[in-house]
């Protein structure tokens, strides 16, 4: 497996899982466009598109940092066009950008509702749509959405229906586009973690250090994404992958390096019960 010479377009890749995916590809000598809004340092969020680009270059890849709000159709079009101009095409589209607000219905401000739907659902649709004409020309084209399985149980909706709707919108892009573009050989899949992942969202919104200490590093998602986008596109589409299961399929049996020192791991949202039933990993489940 290798992504040498391949071009990845990653939304929201200036930190966390998106950056980890970029760095894993960069180790092969891949080209990576980081399309995100963070051009200036943020007091609570690490990294910018420029620091991400520096890391990608140091890891062995070529980087193109582009200021891009994926809610803006013109900006997405310009970012994709610039990627094709600089790197000659697009092989892989990673829809990583996401917004989260875990509030019940009456406490959900409509500006927050709109933000989540514009970034999660609309943004994933728009970025995919804009990349597809170029993916059609690639040898092994992949779209990978960082989105959960469509497990339609009320427990995933009752506490934060607006967020769940927006996140499942990304998953529905996987469901629909995988069938729509199957005949053209464009793979469209989702990837989701079994456990919580130590990201800025976890540290700032989902429990802070307490939950972070029960989380795996973003590297597990990066390694799983790497395995997926290296697979033959015509044989690997329409799947809702779980990170640990992907890596087990690649022969990984020891996952301790992804959470060194953790005494207990926390389950992530949206993971179906049957996934835990077939997993050997013991996690604390809040649902």
Image: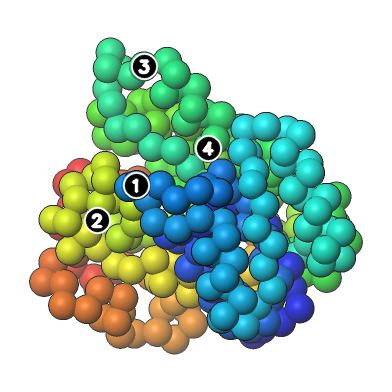
In this picture, is 119 found above or below 92? above
**Labels 4 and 1: the sequence-earlier one:** 1
* Residue nearest the viewer, comparing 130 with 203: 203
User: Is the residue marked by circle 2 packed among few (<14), some (14-19), or many (20+) residues within 10 Å?
Assistant: many
Q: CA distance from mark 4 to mark 1?
A: 23 Å
**Labels 2 and 1: the sequence-earlier one:** 1
Labels 2, 1: front one: 1
In this picture, is 98 found above or below 22? above
* Residue nearest the viewer, comparing 115 with 103: 115
Q: Secondary structure at mark 4?
A: helix
Q: CA distance from mark 3 to mark 2?
A: 27 Å
**Labels 2 and 4: the sequence-earlier one:** 4
In this picture, is 189 found above or below 170? below
Q: At x 70% / y 46%, what residue is drawn?
A: 128
On the rendered structure, is 107 left or right of 3? left
Q: Position of residue 142 (x, y in %)?
A: 69, 61
Q: Which mark is residue 267?
A: 2
C-beta proximity under 8 Å, tags 2 and 4: no
Q: At x 47% / y 31%, what residue is drawn?
A: 116
The residue tagged 3 is: 109
């Amino acid at each position: 497996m290798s992504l040498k010479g391949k071009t990845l377009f990653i939304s929201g890749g200036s930190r966390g899982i998106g950056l980890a995916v970029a760095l894993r590809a960069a180790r092969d000598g891949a080209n990576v466009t980081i399309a995100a809004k963070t051009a200036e340092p943020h007091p609570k969020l690490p990294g910018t598109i420029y620091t991400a680009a520096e890391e990608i270059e140091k890891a062995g890849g070529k980087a193109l940092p582009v200021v891009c709000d994926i809610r803006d159709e013109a900006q997405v079009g310009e970012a994709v066009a610039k990627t094709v101009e600089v790197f000659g095409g697009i092989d892989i589209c990673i829809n990583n950008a996401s917004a989260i607000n875990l509030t019940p219905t009456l406490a959900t401000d409509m500006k927050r509702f709109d933000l989540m739907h514009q970034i999660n659902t609309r943004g994933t649709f728009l970025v995919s749509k804009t990349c597809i004409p170029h993916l059609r020309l690639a040898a092994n084209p992949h779209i990978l959405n960082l989105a959960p399985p469509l497990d339609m149980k009320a427990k995933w909706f009752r506490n934060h229906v607006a967020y769940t709707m927006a996140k499942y919108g990304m998953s529905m892009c996987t469901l629909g586009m995988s069938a729509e573009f199957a005949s053209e050989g464009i793979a469209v899949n989702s990837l989701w973690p079994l456990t919580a992942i130590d990201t800025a969202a976890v540290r700032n919104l989902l429990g802070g250090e307490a939950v972070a200490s029960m989380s795996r590093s973003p590297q597990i998602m990066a390694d799983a994404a790497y395995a997926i986008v290296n697979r033959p596109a015509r044989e690997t589409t329409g799947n809702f992958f779980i990170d640990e299961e992907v890596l087990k399929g690649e022969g990984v049996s020891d996952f301790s390096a992804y959470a060194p020192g953790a005494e207990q791991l926390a389950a992530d949202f949206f993971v179906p019960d049957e996934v835990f039933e077939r997993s050997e990993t013991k996690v604390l489940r809040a649902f």
